[in-house]
Image (spheres, rainbow, N blue to C red):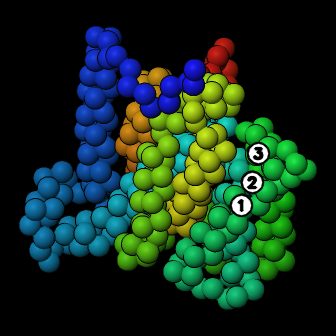
Amino acid sequence: MSAPPVDATLPVTEADRVSSGRRALGLVVFLALLAVAVLISFMFGSNPLPLGEVWRVLWDRDNSEASSIVWTLRMPRTVIAVVAGAAFAVAGALIQALTRNPLADSGLLGVNAGAIFAVTLGVAVFGVASISGYIWFAFVGAAAATVLVFFIGAAGGGTASPVRLILAGVALGAVLHGITTFMQLIDPDTFERIRRWGVGSTAATSLEQMRTVLPFLVLGFVLAVAISRQLDAVALGDDLASSLGVKVMRVRIVGLVAMTLLAGGATALTGGLAFVGLMIPHIVRWFVGPNQRWIFAYSLIAGPIMVLLADVIGRVLGRPGEIEAGVMCAVIGAPVLIVLVRRRKASGL
């Protein structure tokens, strides 16, 4: 007798209904927190604005200084922080599911290193001098790194298992990082031109430039949702997933494509935002358990919250200048990572 398909309809128990209800309520709470984070992003910066003034100009845009600050300066970086935060978080959830490692992120596959290497190469060799050029070099570099990691992991007649993919990604990332650093050291002008983008900034890209990357991010989200049910089976192990009718290799390839679209596109927009893809899915899993659809939904909201708060803290602490969001994400994420590592048992997948 053949095994039932993985998406076979199972009886819904009362406990399932209660659990789904709690998850849905938690999602509403996270959405409220995101709305608060967006308002805080509009309020704080080198020139703080009261909540009432922000609320007024949001509904009645005029020629006042407050309106210019909100709509011209803070609105674009807030939108980009939301988009990039969501993309990094879902990409992290994907790679954790694919590798069955709750402390993994897209950086382990060399995606960020590939994007930064490509941008450095574009500036040094091809003279790219605008963010519009950075975006495409970063995206191509991220995609090329992922493809190369997959082929290295599958070399020698073996299968591209999670362990082999991670080892290949770490090795490739180290090589690309070393070459990038060498190029930047021998050409200080190159380093200076990409410094702000390289450390992770929400203010280096315009909304118009974001629109060129947005279709790729949307496609990445769609692909991630499309394989979410199969990822629940893959978490049980390749053999069991195959016995349930899941084509594991196809799921893994689609997942890698989705992760590349999300992490590569987000890196192109903001540069590297450390720990978002690692920390957010791991914490989210505490609330929702191993169900990937709920993990994706929560990550889609919690990622932007982290990036927005990191961006606002950097603006406040660095006033009248600012500390880049990528630096603050690392400052916030590193202590949390230490706590996660010191736990007796990491959240299971």
On the rendered structure, is 261 left or right of 184?
left
In-front residue for pair 325/150: 150
Q: Residue at x 79, y 43 (%)?
A: 159
Q: Residue at x 45, y 46 (%)?
A: 226
Percent x, y of residue 85: 46, 51
Numbered disc in front, either 3 or 1: 3
Q: How dense is the environment of label 2, judged by Cα within 10 Å: few (below 14), some, or many (20 and up)?
A: many
In the rendered image, which quarter is residue 263 located in?
bottom right
Residue 147's disc is 1
Does 325 sit above or below residue 76? above
Q: Residue at x 28, y 15 (%)?
A: 18
**Which amino acid is tagged 1?**
Val
User: Which residue is farthest right?
Assistant: 156
In the rendered image, which quarter is residue 319 located in?
bottom left
Percent x, y of residue 262: 52, 56
Residue 150's disc is 2
